[in-house]
Image: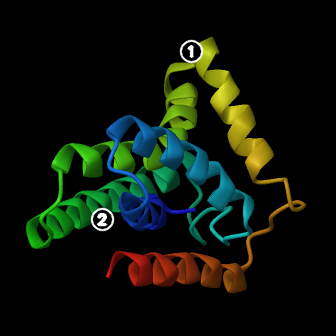
Amino acid sequence: MFLTTHTIASLATLKISSNPIILFGLNFLLHYILDSIPHGDWGAIKGFKNLIANYAILFICDIFFVITIYFLYTKSNPVNTINVLCAITGSILPDILWGMYYVTKLKFLKIFVNINYYAHQVFGVQEEQKLYFLTQILVIFISLMIIY
Ligand SMILES: [Zn+2]
């Protein structure tokens, strides 16, 4: 699932708790729960041969949206920015951790590759399927309903 989707979902959890540590942990867990639902981005951009460049571009766009959402949200809502930062960080960290494994090859990060892989297999093998993008739109829609 895109980091953008995870970020919007994490803003909805601000309604559940105002403890930054709980928000961080909750969103870290929620990331894997959301990832287990087939969500269509399990693949590369069509026509892109270089997989690393492919993921790098997706990641940069995604992070750009995450930062934009953070500023838009904190600017227009009277919220505790520490809580918002903890919620967002918890929600995007799982993907950053497995990404870091492929960049650094640090052994202790391997577990996050495995958990990520497992989360995507819970309800069967996820194939790249355009229709499943609707899942992400639905997650964003439900989250926005909770936020506003
Ligand atoms: Zn993920």
Image: 102 above or below 90: above
Percent coordinates x, y for residue 46 in the rendering: 60, 72
Residue extending farthest right: 124
Q: Which of 146 and 101 lies nearest the eye of the viewer?
A: 146
Which quadrant would the N terminus be assigned to in this image?
A: bottom right
Which three-letter amino acid code belongs to the residue tagged 2? Phe
In terms of image quadrants, where is residue 108?
top right
Percent coordinates x, y for residue 119 in the rendering: 75, 49
Q: Badge 1 is on which residue?
A: 106
Percent coordinates x, y for residue 62 in the rendering: 38, 60
Percent coordinates x, y for residue 99 in the rendering: 53, 37
Name the residue located 48 percent from the left edge and 60 percent from the top edge.
Answer: 6
Residue extending farthest top: 107
Q: Badge 2 is on which residue?
A: 65
Image: 148 above or below 97: below
Check disc 1: other Cα within 10 Å, few if <14, some if 14-19, many if 20+: few
129 horizontally vs 107: left or right: right
Check disc 2: other Cα within 10 Å, few if <14, some if 14-19, many if 20+: some
- If you read the primary sequence from the N terminus, does the residue marked by circle 1 or circle 2 appear first? 2
Which three-letter amino acid code belongs to the residue tagged 1? Leu
Disc 2 Cβ-to-ligand 1 distance below 8 Å: no
Name the residue located 85 percent from the left edge and 54 percent from the top edge.
Answer: 122
Q: Which of 115 and 126 lies nearest the eye of the viewer?
A: 115
Q: Secondary structure beneath disc 1? A: loop
Image: 11 above or below 52: below
Which quadrant would the C terminus be assigned to in this image?
A: bottom left
Name the residue located 36 percent from the left edge and 59 percent from the top edge.
Answer: 14
19 horizontally vs 133: left or right: left
